[in-house]
Image: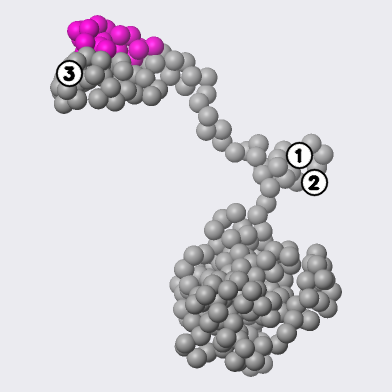
Amino acid sequence: MALDGFDPHLTRRAMRAEMLDAETERALAYAWRDRRDKQALDRLITAYMRLAISMAVKFRRYGAPMNDLVQEASLGLMKAADRFDPDRGVRFSTYAVWWIKASIQDYVMRNWSLVRTGSTSPQKSLFFNLRRVQARFEREAAARGEQLDQHQLRQMIAMEIGVSLADVETMQGRLSGGDYSLNAPQNTDDGAREWIDVLEDEAPQGADHVELRHDTRQLRTWLIHAMADLNERERHIITERRLRDTPRTLENLGQELSLSKERVRQIEAAAFDKLRKSLEARSREVHHFLS
């Protein structure tokens, strides 16, 4: 079986791997669980790599690269081997199927669209079963000589899978096509605008820049005047604690000023309160002048 973009050597190695009987499989599982025997783990995983590949093939219709699907299937197989409990009396293949499938499905859903397609179990079930269920309902209706309208069909799908009608409508939209580039032209004409050209620029415009610079200068002036109202020690503490890229610690300042950490904290809090009141007073003055 030739698979586009997939290493055929891996398939051949998997097909040549040994077939484990239940007793050998259980012994390998015990060796890994109890002694962390890496050779036993490698033998167990190699024997069931064909299972991982066969499950990965079933998801090719979602457009993911085959190598990536096999890699995800392998990760699921390794997770299954790491968590398998041979004391439960089930075959490893039965247990591994669920981990392999979950790993592949998560990968497909992560890479289907830049917009997250679904996260809950019902949404995942909808993603992987919508088209199959829809096709079945359409076949059954055709056999009865009926034709379902889209609303009826969506209601039936929602009831069958156990999701809301809105979930079905949303998923149908997402499955109808992939993501589109914002650099794609709006039409086929030469020199046509790209879709990105019609997006609103959220960056500050010219007037916004002027207003921002004015407000920044005003605030800086107010801060300078407010700092001038502090005594030298208060200014020093505020500068070192609030205006540095890397603020100094209370302990460090206390050692410099021969004060306790608590006393430095009290001075800082009182000085900061003075600054706040000074800035609020100037702001009220401006508001009163403009009103």
Q: Quadrant of the N terminus?
A: bottom right
**Which residue is denoted by mark 1 in the rendering?**
192
**Which residue is denoted by mark 3 in the rendering?**
259
Q: Residues within 10 Å of mark 2 (few under 14, many from 20)?
A: few
**3 or 2: tag closer to the N-terminus:** 2
Residue 105 visible in the picture: no
Q: Are marks 3 and 1 in contact (CB under 8 Å)?
A: no
Instruction: Compare residues 7 and 23 and report the one nearer the observer.
Output: 23
Give the Cα separation between the discs numbered 1 and 2. 7 Å
Q: Amino acid at mark 3?
A: Leu
Whole-percent x and y of residue 33? 51, 77
The answer to whether residue 52 is left or right of residue 163 is right
Q: Secondary structure at mark 2?
A: loop
Q: Residues within 10 Å of mark 1 (few under 14, many from 20)?
A: few
Q: Residue at 79% of width from left, 67% of height from top?
A: 6
From the image, give the main secondary structure of the stretch colored magenta.
helix
Residue 75 visible in the picture: yes
Q: Amino acid at mark 2?
A: Thr
Residue 217 figure quarter: top left
Single out the mark in the foreground, 3 or 1. 3
Q: Residue at 72% of width from left, 38% of height from top?
A: 193
Q: Are marks 1 and 2 in contact (CB under 8 Å)?
A: yes
Instruction: Compare residues 265 and 257 and report the one nearer the observer.
Output: 257
Residue 266 vertical placement versus 142 (above, below) = above
The numbered disc on residue 75 is none
Q: Secondary structure at mark 3?
A: loop
Instruction: Compare residues 163 and 226 and report the one nearer the observer.
Output: 226
Residue 193 vertical placement versus 92 (above, below) = above
**Which residue is denoted by mark 2 in the rendering?**
188
Q: Residues within 10 Å of mark 3 (few under 14, many from 20)?
A: some
Which span of residues is magenta-colored?
217-236
